[in-house]
């Protein structure tokens, strides 16, 4: 390997235990690595030097001084080469890989379905049946009735893996069918990787097994024109982000045979600075500008608009960096903590919702914090109704993710 090995700065590396063996789990928020990667915990002394500052020979010398043992340079090189092949190093190979993907993206007319054939069926009829079952499941809401008004302003729906969790989505979309006549859906998705700006719009149509969901490019362009600080962010970040795609397939399924609609896909980044200081994100000049521009465009676009916040709640356990495990025995604790936070939404208090997360420095890792908060600010005043709350467990890592469906009016 010619370069000094450097791990990508956006990776999250967590200690886990698998079948009694301690390992390091590499989480890739950008999803550039397409497989789960675990390495033995014994690699830590080597990996700590993958900072880009040292050559393989210098890493070898440091390890010799530190441990008194000679680690063959071939072993260090092999570890680096295998990580690089999985796109986990910040290297020329990784940058060339991203450059190729970006070129393909720029040429593509639509945003292709990332999860078709993985998280949900790739064939249309199979996908329709797959989504139907979430409404009719024992814990589902039942099939939607006829529409009886346009009272609904927004829904909060999860973006967790479908499988056993799809019924929670169905609660949100049943309400959307029954109480919205929107022709435009602004989908505010969680950005799971670093983005250039707070909001990243996507001008491409979304292709799924259920057809093409058309994007309202004029809405996006008009919103950008309203911004005092002009947005120059490209939409490449949407290529690997799943939080909007999952809402699109539910929306296509729910609206099938009812009416034509368009979407505005928006990735929303986090509020890390505000979480540290405890100040309201809306006090930030840029955040305030985005809220103002979007709110004006929604109010003046001449269309019936409904917001969709694609948002999970707490991420708990060793998989996400906690020392302690979270198994079903702790479900009431998880629920109580979520209820404190969601209680603010039920009182129409978006600021209180954010403040509850900031009070503990987002220790519970509310990944949908930004899209939910932004939805609240765009709607104020609003009232909210909790439709369903649930939690999914990852037993091997003793970790858990909570999520909910809500309707906002």
Image (tube, rainbow, N blue to C red):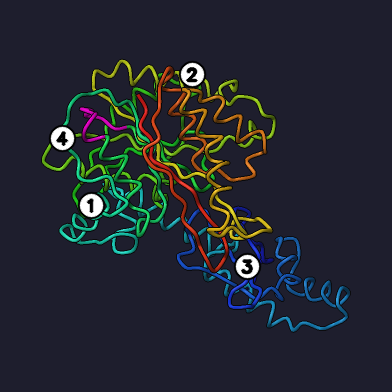
Q: For the point 17% across and 37% down, which residue is it?
A: 145
The mark closer to the camera, 4 or 2, is 4
Q: Residue 251 carries which label?
A: none
Quarter of the picture containing the N terminus is: bottom right
Above or below, comparing residue 137 to residue 206 in the picture: below
In this figure, which residue is indicated by the disc labeled 4? 260
Q: For the point 45% across and 65% down, which residue is it?
A: 34
In this figure, which residue is indicated by the disc labeled 1? 136
- Distance between the Cα atoms at labels 1 and 3? 37 Å
> Magenta segment, which residues?
176-185
Residue 165 percent across, percent down from the top left: 37, 54
Q: How crowded is mark 4: few (under 14 residues within 10 Å), some or many (20 or more)?
A: few
Which of marks 4 and 1 precedes in the sequence? 1
Above or below, comparing residue 79 to residue 112 in the picture: below
Label 2: state its secondary structure: loop
Magenta region includes residue 177: yes
- Distance between the Cα atoms at labels 2 and 3? 46 Å
Q: In which quarter of the image is residue 88?
A: bottom right
In this figure, which residue is indicated by the disc labeled 2? 228
Which of marks 3 and 2 precedes in the sequence? 3
Label 3: state its secondary structure: strand
- Distance between the Cα atoms at labels 3 and 4? 47 Å
Residue 345 percent across, percent down from the top left: 48, 28
Q: Residues within 10 Å of mark 3 (few under 14, many from 20)?
A: many
| 111 displayed left or right of 55 | left
Q: Which mark is residue 16?
A: 3
Q: Quadrant of residue 317?
A: bottom right
Which of marks 2 and 4 precedes in the sequence? 2
- Disc count in the image? 4
């Amino acid at each position: 390997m010619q370069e000094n090995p450097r791990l990508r700065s956006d990776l999250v590396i967590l200690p886990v235990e698998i079948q009694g063996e301690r390992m390091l789990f590499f989480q890739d928020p950008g999803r550039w690595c397409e497989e789960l990667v675990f390495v033995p915990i014994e690699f830590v002394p080597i990996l700590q030097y993958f900072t880009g500052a040292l050559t393989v020979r210098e890493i070898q010398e440091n390890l010799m001084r530190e441990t008194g043992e000679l680690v063959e340079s071939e072993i260090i090189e092999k570890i680096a080469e295998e990580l690089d092949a999985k796109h986990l190093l910040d290297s020329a190979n990784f940058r060339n890989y991203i450059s190729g993907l970006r070129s393909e993206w720029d040429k593509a007319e639509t945003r292709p379905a990332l999860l078709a054939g993985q998280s949900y069926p790739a064939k249309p009829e199979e996908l329709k049946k797959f989504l139907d079952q979430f409404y009719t499941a024992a814990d589902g809401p039942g099939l939607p009735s006829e529409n009886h008004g346009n009272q609904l302003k927004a829904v909060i729906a999860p973006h967790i893996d479908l499988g056993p969790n799809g019924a929670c989505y169905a609660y949100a979309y049943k309400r959307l069918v029954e109480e919205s006549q929107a022709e435009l859906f602004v989908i505010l998705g969680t950005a799971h990787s670093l983005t250039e700006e707070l909001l990243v719009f996507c001008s491409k149509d979304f292709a799924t097994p259920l057809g093409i969901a058309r994007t309202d490019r004029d809405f996006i362009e008009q919103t950008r024109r309203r911004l005092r600080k002009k947005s120059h962010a490209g939409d490449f970040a949407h290529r690997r982000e799943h939080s909007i795609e999952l809402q699109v397939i539910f929306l296509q399924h729910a609206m099938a045979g009812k009416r034509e609609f368009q979407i505005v896909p928006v990735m929303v980044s986090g509020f890390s600075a505000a979480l540290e200081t405890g100040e309201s994100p809306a006090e930030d000049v840029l955040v305030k500008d985005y809220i103002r521009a979007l709110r004006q465009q929604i109010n003046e676009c001449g269309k019936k608009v409904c917001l969709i916040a694609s948002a999970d709640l707490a991420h708990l356990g060793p998989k996400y960096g906690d020392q302690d495990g979270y198994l079903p025995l702790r479900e009431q604790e998880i629920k109580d903590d979520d209820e404190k936070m969601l209680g603010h939404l039920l009182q129409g208090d978006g600021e209180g919702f954010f403040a509850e997360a900031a009070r503990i420095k987002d220790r519970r890792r509310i990944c949908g914090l930004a899209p939910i908060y932004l939805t609240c600010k765009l709607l104020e005043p609003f009232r909210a109704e909790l439709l369903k709350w649930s939690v999914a467990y990852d037993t091997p890592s003793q970790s858990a993710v909570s999520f909910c469906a809500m309707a906002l009016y």
